[in-house]
Image: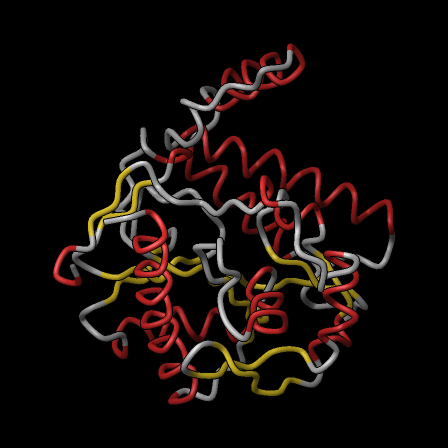
Amino acid sequence: MKENEKLRKVQLLELEIAKELKRICKKNNIQYFLLAGSVLGAVRHKGFIPWDDDMDFGMLRTDYDIFVKVCEKDLDHRFFLQTWQTDPCYPFAYAKLRMQGTHFIEEFSKDSKIKDGIFIDIFPLDNEPKSFLLTKIRDSRCFVCERLMWLKKGMGKNIKSKSLGGKIKYIVFDLISKGISYNCLKKHYEKILRSYNSEKTEKIAFTLITSIFGKHSFERKWIEELEEIDFETTSFPVFKERKEYLTYVYGNYMIFPPEDKRQGHLPVDIDFGPYK
């Protein structure tokens, strides 16, 4: 199969996974919405960014917790919701909804033992503190926890930085990770993420501090109104204030990047299983 055909097949299977997310959220009255590059794809391409191979969704923390719970009984057998609770080798603070019977092994995680498969990402959004200083402290703590957990579960060990500073940072983080238990890190990270959720704040943030060029936090008011937007053969909720969001994240978002920058995240190994 040619690479472009393989990419399109991945996209269409991800769309089927996203339709299952849509079904569950509609059934249980859970608010969800497109996030990050999927918003850009919906606005600029009416679907996937042609060279991209992932889908991102967001939920406020309360909706996310409900979603994780209802998936225990409502999720179709063709899918698997991967979280800290359902996969002991999974080190991320957000969920992946995977398609059973497929394999999708990424370079970053090829040395880990997590359950793999074609997936979409589902991010919980938590409150960011009002103070700029407190926000930077919170984000720094999340950054450290995130990377220590990755190392504890074998993520990224095959990807070495070319710079001396990057190599030193890797060695330091690797040494620290050996002295802290995974469960301790997980509890600490979860506590940090939820620490400001009892307050009313202007900004919210999703996990994964390296996400979309550091623009992992944004204005709460942008998600106060949602509306359906076409995406391939279906539709999904997205911010009514999506122009403000996309400009904040990408600048002039209607301009295509240079061809050498049009790269997705295709895996080192892929198997479509029963969907060949």
Name the residue rendered at 41%, 87% in the picture. Answer: 28
Relative to the observer, which residue lies in front, 216 or 88?
Answer: 216
Left or right of residue 227: residue 13: left
Spot occupied by residue 188 in the image (x, y as percentages of width and height): 55, 43
Q: Is 105 in front, or is 132? A: 105
Quarter placement of the C terminus: bottom left
Asked if 103 appears above or below 31 in the picture, the reply is above
Would you say 199 lies left or right of 48 here?
right
- Residue 114, placed above or below residue 174: below
38 relative to 51, above or below: below
Give the quarter of the image for residue 168: top right
Residue at 70% x, 82% y: name it: 240
User: Eyeballing the image, is 258 above or below 109?
Assistant: below
The answer to whether residue 61 is seen in the rendering is: no
Apparent side of residue 232 relative to residue 41 in the rendered image (left or right): left
The x and y percentages for residue 136 are 79, 43
At x 36% / y 54%, what residue is drawn? Answer: 7
Q: How is the image coloured?
A: secondary structure
Across and down, in percent, residue 145 comes to 57, 37
* Residue at x 75%, y 62% (from the top left corner): 218
Residue 190 seen in render: yes
- Residue 170, percent from left and from top: 55, 19
Q: Quadrant of the rendered structure where residue 183 is?
A: top left
